[in-house]
């Protein structure tokens, strides 16, 4: 007899990750379900790497070799953004994609930064509606001006869900 690790009738959690690009006035919202990864430091590194890799592919198609400077404004979630592994991840970015990476950590408390605005816009677009698939959520969010939503399906062979960044960054 096998052991069931997932309750068949439970709701599946769909998580989100926001990248607010202030230079283009376009924000990306990545949705993924709890089967792909959680909300820990590995998940954040995975999602950030996915974003920068896709951005780099777009630049290469435009024949731009590398961006000069990346300014990252991190929210004030101590457990997610101020860990040694996250800082080590950001030291990888200038080696792969950018000439220079600058990090700004906001002070603790609710900062009302641009990513918070994007979450509010997404909330307003989905308020009072029922969704039965992640793609339905993506469609609703893509109706918001200046927001591009996508779903990262961990079952897709092209999926970039990496795990275990620690050994690679030390």
Image (tube, rainbow, N blue to C red):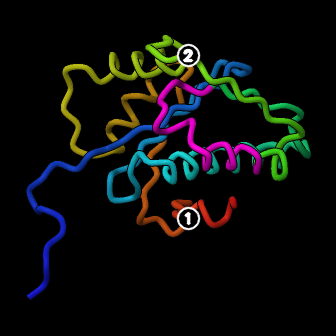
Give the main secondary structure, helix, strand or loop, of the magenta stretch: helix
Q: In the figure, is residue 94 to the left or right of 151?
A: right
Please provide percent x and percent y for residue 113: 54, 14
Badge 1 vs badge 2, beta-carbon distance below 8 Å = no
Determine whether the residue tagged by mark 2 lies in a helix, strand or loop: loop
Q: Is residue 42 above or below residue 15?
A: below
Examine the structure image and report whether residue 84 is included in the region drawn in magenta: yes
* Relative depth, front residue between 134 and 67: 67
- Crowding near the residue tagged with mark 2, few <14, some 14–19, many ≥20 C-alpha atoms within 10 Å: few
Residue pictured at 69% horizontal, 59% vertical: 169
Quadrant where the C terminus is found in the figure: bottom right
Q: In the figure, is residue 36 to the left or right of 102?
A: left
Return the mark for residue 158: 1
Quadrant where the N terminus is found in the figure: bottom left
Q: Is residue 135 above or below residue 139?
A: below
- Magenta region, residue range: 74-92
Residue extending furthest toward the top: 112
Q: In the figure, is residue 60 to the left or right of 26?
A: right
Please provide percent x and percent y for residue 168: 67, 65
* Relative depth, front residue between 143 and 108: 108
Examine the structure image and report whether residue 109 is included in the region drawn in magenta: no
Distance CA(mark 1)–CA(mark 2): 37 Å
Q: Is residue 94 above or below residue 142?
A: below
* Relative depth, front residue between 87 and 111: 87
* Relative depth, front residue between 170 and 66: 170
Circle 1 or circle 2, nearest the eye: 2
Q: Which residue is mark 2?
A: 107
Residue pictured at 55% horizontal, 36% vertical: 81
- Crowding near the residue tagged with mark 1, few <14, some 14–19, many ≥20 C-alpha atoms within 10 Å: few
Determine whether the residue tagged by mark 1 lies in a helix, strand or loop: loop
* Mark earlier in primary sequence (1, 2): 2
Please provide percent x and percent y for residue 101: 80, 35
């Amino acid at each position: 007899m096998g052991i069931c690790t997932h309750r068949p009738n439970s709701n599946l959690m769909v998580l989100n990750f926001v990248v607010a690009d202030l230079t283009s006035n376009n924000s990306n919202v990545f949705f993924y379900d709890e089967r792909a990864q959680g909300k820990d430091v590995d998940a954040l590194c995975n999602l950030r790497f996915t974003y920068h890799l896709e951005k780099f592919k777009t630049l290469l198609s435009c024949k731009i070799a590398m961006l000069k400077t990346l300014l990252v404004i991190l929210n004030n979630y101590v457990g997610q953004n101020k860990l040694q592994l996250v800082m080590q991840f950001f030291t990888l970015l200038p080696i792969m994609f950018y000439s220079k990476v600058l990090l700004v950590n906001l002070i603790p408390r609710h900062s009302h930064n641009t990513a918070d605005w994007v979450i509010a816009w997404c909330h307003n677009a989905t308020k009072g509606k029922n969704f039965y698939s992640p793609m339905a959520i993506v469609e609703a969010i893509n109706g918001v001006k200046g927001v591009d939503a996508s779903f990262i399906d961990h079952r897709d062979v092209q999926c970039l869900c990496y795990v275990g960044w620690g050994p690679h960054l030390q």
